[in-house]
Amino acid sequence: MTDDRIPTLAVWKFASCDGCQLTLLDCEDELLGLAEKVQISHFLEMSGAEGSGGAGSATLDGVGPYDLSLVEGSVTTAEDARRIRRIRQISRRLVTIGACATAGGIQALRNFADVTEFRAAVYAHPEYIATLATSTPISAHVPVDFELRGCPIDRRQLLEVITAYLAERKPNIPANSVCSECKRRGTTCITVAHGTPCLGPVTHAGCGAICPAYDRGCYGCFGPSNSLNMAAMVRQLQHDGMDERDVLRVFRTFNAASPEYAELPDLVHQDDSTDRETR
C-alpha cells in the first residue's frame, strides 16, 4: 500500500461448496499473522457480521471499498451476475479462487445438458427456482486481476497471492504442468511406467502431484495449464485404453467448461474415426 492505513480484505461466495474459503481458514497460524497486516472486513464464512470487530448485521453486497477481494464460486443466477458487478465496483483488486470461480466448476456440467430437465428432476416445485442455463466463471462477467486454480486451492499459493497484492507485486505462482511437480518430488511417470492414463501433462501445477505419488493418474482438479497440447493428450489417453466417452468424461469434472477444453469433442471424434479407419 502507498499510505499508512491498513489494507482491507473481503471474501465472497457464489455457487460453490465453500472448500476454497475453508482453505483460507485452515491457514491457522499464518492467518493470525496475516490478520495483523490486513483488516478482514467481509468474510461471512468466518463471521456472521459485516465490518471489523463482529459488529453489525451481515450484508451480501458489503460496504467497501476493499483493497483486495477474493471470490469463490461461479455465476449461476441473474442475481449472481448483478452482485459480482457490484463487488467489482467496490474492489481495488479482484482475485478468483478455485475451479468454480475460474472455470464454472463441476456445476458447469449443466452447460452440456438441459437445465430445465435437471431442475424438474431435483426440485418438487421447479417453477420457484430461478437459475441460469449455464454456470460461468467470474471472468465471464467482470475483469479479474488474477485467477488461482484448484479444487480446492492450495493454501500456500493462496497466501502467496494475498501477500503479493498487499506488497503491490505480481504473485509468484508457477504456470507449468503437474509433470514438473512429479519430477521435483522424484515420482516415476505412471504413464510411462505402467500405462496409467494421467492428465498431468495438461494440468496446471499447484497440487504437489499428490495423485501420481500414490500411483493414481492426475484427474485435472487444478484445470488446464498455461501451455498445453490437447490433440497430443487425447491421442495419449486413447493409447492408454480410453475410448471416446471416457476421454470426454475425464475432462468434464471440476473444470468442465474451461475454454481450453472446448475443442475436445472434435479432437476425440477425429482421433476415434482415424483409429477405426486404420483398423
Image (spheres, grey):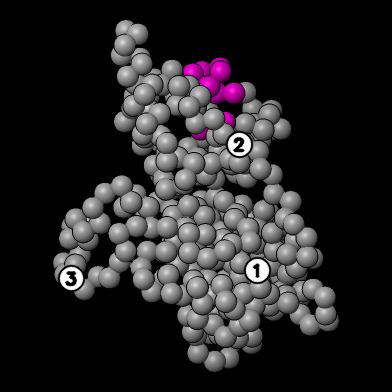
Count how many numbered circles sit on residues in the image: 3
In this orientation, which residue lies closer to the viewer: 266 or 191?
266
The three-letter amino acid code for the residue at tag 1 is Arg
Residue highlighted by disc 2: 227
From the viewer's perspective, is 250 left or right of 221? left
Residue highlighted by disc 3: 127
The first of marks 3 and 2 along the sequence is 3
- Picture coordinates of residue 112 (x, y %)? 31, 47
Residue contact between numbered discs 3 and 2, judged by CB atoms under 8 Å: no
In this orientation, which residue lies closer to the viewer: 185 or 130?
130
- Picture coordinates of residue 276 (x, y %)? 30, 14
Look at the image and say whether residue 175 sits in the magenta stretch: no
Q: Give the Cα distance between marks 3 and 2.
A: 43 Å
The first of marks 1 and 3 along the sequence is 1
In this orientation, which residue lies closer to the viewer: 233 or 277?
277
Q: Which portion, as a residue range, is magenta?
A: 189-201
Q: Give the Cα distance between marks 1 and 2.
A: 26 Å
Question: Which type of secondary structure does the marked residue at label 3 adopt?
Answer: helix
